[in-house]
Amino acid sequence: MNTKNLVILSLLAGIGVVLHTVMPAFLTIKPDMMLAMMFLGIILIPEIKSVMLLAIVTGVLSGLTTGFPGGTIPNIIDKPVTALIFFGLFLTLKKYINPIVCAGVLTAVGTLVSGSVFLTAAYFLVGLPGPFAALFAAGVLPAIALNTVIMVILYPIAQSIFKRTKFTSASVIQK
């Protein structure tokens, strides 16, 4: 893992913290905009060490800025699980699907997994402040839509920046 990768991952985590902090909560749950930045980092730097580092940092930062009662530990559990599933799906699908479509679809699936793992962990660890279905509908479904739109917009921009700067240590999806 080199310094350029660490700088890129830390910038994405920082942007994710800002997005996560300013996002309003609905029924005590915030749509997790930090996921889009984590997913973008995984796509740009698909190395297992980078993925795990980014997942742990994202989980801790997301836990510190959560509006969910007792949501710190569920966030720390949720992000590594989601990152590994996203990473596995990404490695499997990147050769077969258009890059932008792949990024959008995987972001939607990853956000769905993340919301499900988070709410399930919260249910077992601290209890939910409302019905699972209501929290899922109020927090996870809007996050799926927002994260997918953000990824479809940001991914081509990030991809073109990587091409122009001749940054070779990240393997950006190319067909």
Image (cartoon, helix red, strand yellow):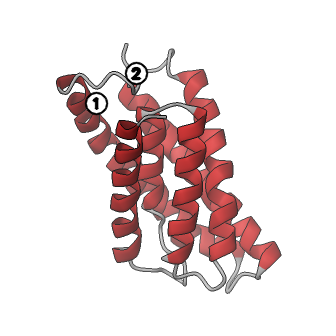
Residue 139 x %, y %:
53, 70
Q: Is residue 3 left or right of residue 29?
A: left
- Estimate how packed mark 1 is, as few (under 14), some (14 to 19) or many (20 or more) residues with alpha carbons within 10 Å: some
Q: Is residue 1 above or below residue 92?
A: below
Query: In terms of secondary structure, where does tag 1 sit?
Result: helix
Q: Is residue 92 above or below residue 82?
A: above
- Estimate how packed mark 2 is, as few (under 14), some (14 to 19) or many (20 or more) residues with alpha carbons within 10 Å: few
State the quadrant of the C terminus: top left
Q: Are marks 1 and 2 in contact (CB under 8 Å)?
A: no
The answer for how far apart the CA atoms under marks 1 and 2 are is: 13 Å
Residue 159 - label: 1
Q: Is residue 130 above or below residue 2?
A: below
- The residue drawn where x is 64% and y is 31% is 88
Where does label 2 land, which residue? 98
- The residue drawn where x is 39% and y is 53% is 10
Residue at the outermost front position: 3
Residue 129 x %, y %:
67, 86
Query: In terms of secondary structure, where does tag 2 sit?
Result: loop
Residue 111 x %, y %:
54, 52
Q: Is residue 103 left or right of residue 116?
A: left
Q: Sequence-wise, which precedes: disc 1 or disc 2?
A: 2
Q: How many marks?
A: 2
Instruction: State the image quarter where residue 8 is shown.
Output: top left
Q: Amino acid at mark 1?
A: Gln
Q: Amino acid at mark 2?
A: Asn
- The residue drawn where x is 66% and y is 40% is 85
- The residue drawn where x is 59% and y is 56% is 56
Instruction: State the image quarter where residue 109 is shown.
Output: top right
Tell which tag, 1 or 2, sits nearer the viewer.
1
